[in-house]
Image (cartoon, rainbow, N blue to C red):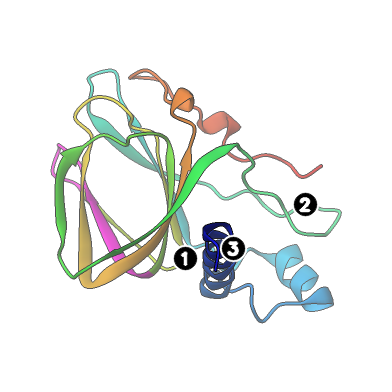
Amino acid sequence: MTSTLARRNLLRNAVTGAGAALGWSGLTGDAAQAAVASTIPWIKRVYHLYTGPDGLTRAEEVKVPPPPSQGGMPRLLRRKVERLTLNAAPPHNFLDFHPANQPTLLIPLFGSIIVGLADGKTYEFGHGDFAFAEDCNGKGHTSQAGAQGSFTVQVQFLKSQCLPSGSTDMEKFWVEPD
């Protein structure tokens, strides 16, 4: 198998797995439209990690926008990406303080990831949660796999999209569908 074909198969399988894990697999046609028209059931929480003016990472929960009133599937996020990474970590695997290399959307598929901040607060992300890390500078955050380990999809945006400390791009995070 050529490396291009292998990469395509890996990406197709990752996207299919991500869709199934997020709850898309059983919804088709009218059922999908009905589910989206009432709620977005597969998204529990979205957190935003960013660098404050003091160089320390902050975390805030982000409100998920309602689906479009016209029906159809909402487009929640549309940006150019640099790469997609599938990452598996054994239980309690720990990575000390680090900034995000580039803005990254973290999507836990199985298990959980625990993010720690300099002030001692921790946030655990699991299936149905998203974390958008754009703390590209400053002290950063810690990352630890939960008790069952973790399997995540990391969507890494262009490094040029990193923002200076004390600023955020969250007002542009969600976009309306065309």
Query: How far across and down, in percent of the image, does residue 164 sit?
Result: 37, 17
Mark 3: secondary structure = helix
Front residue of 88 and 121: 88
Label ID, residue 128: 1
Quadrant for the N terminus in the image: bottom right
Residue flagged by tag 3: what amino acid is it?
Leu
- Image x and y of residue 155, in percent: 47, 48
**Range drawn in magenta:** 110-121
State yes or no: residue 3 in magenta.
Answer: no
Query: Can you tell which of label 2 and label 1 is closer to the viewer?
Result: 1
Give whichever of discs 2 and 1 has the lower sequence position: 2
Q: Would you name the residue on which mark 3 appears?
A: 5
The residue lying at 33 percent from left, 34 percent from top is: 101
Of discs 1 and 3, which sits in the foreground? 3
Q: How far apart, in angstroms, are the residues tagged by discs 3 and 2?
A: 36 Å
Q: Which image quadrant for residue 177?
A: top right
The numbered mark, 3 or 2, whose residue comes first in the sequence reads 3
| Secondary element type, mark 2 | loop
Reading the image, the residue beneath label 2 is 68
Specify whether 38 is left or right of 132.
right
Q: Residues within 10 Å of mark 3 (few under 14, many from 20)?
A: few
Picture coordinates of residue 117 (x, y %)? 20, 41
List x then y, in percent, for residue 53.
29, 18
Residue at 53 percent across and 47 percent down: it is 63
Is 111 inside the magenta-drawn segment? Answer: yes
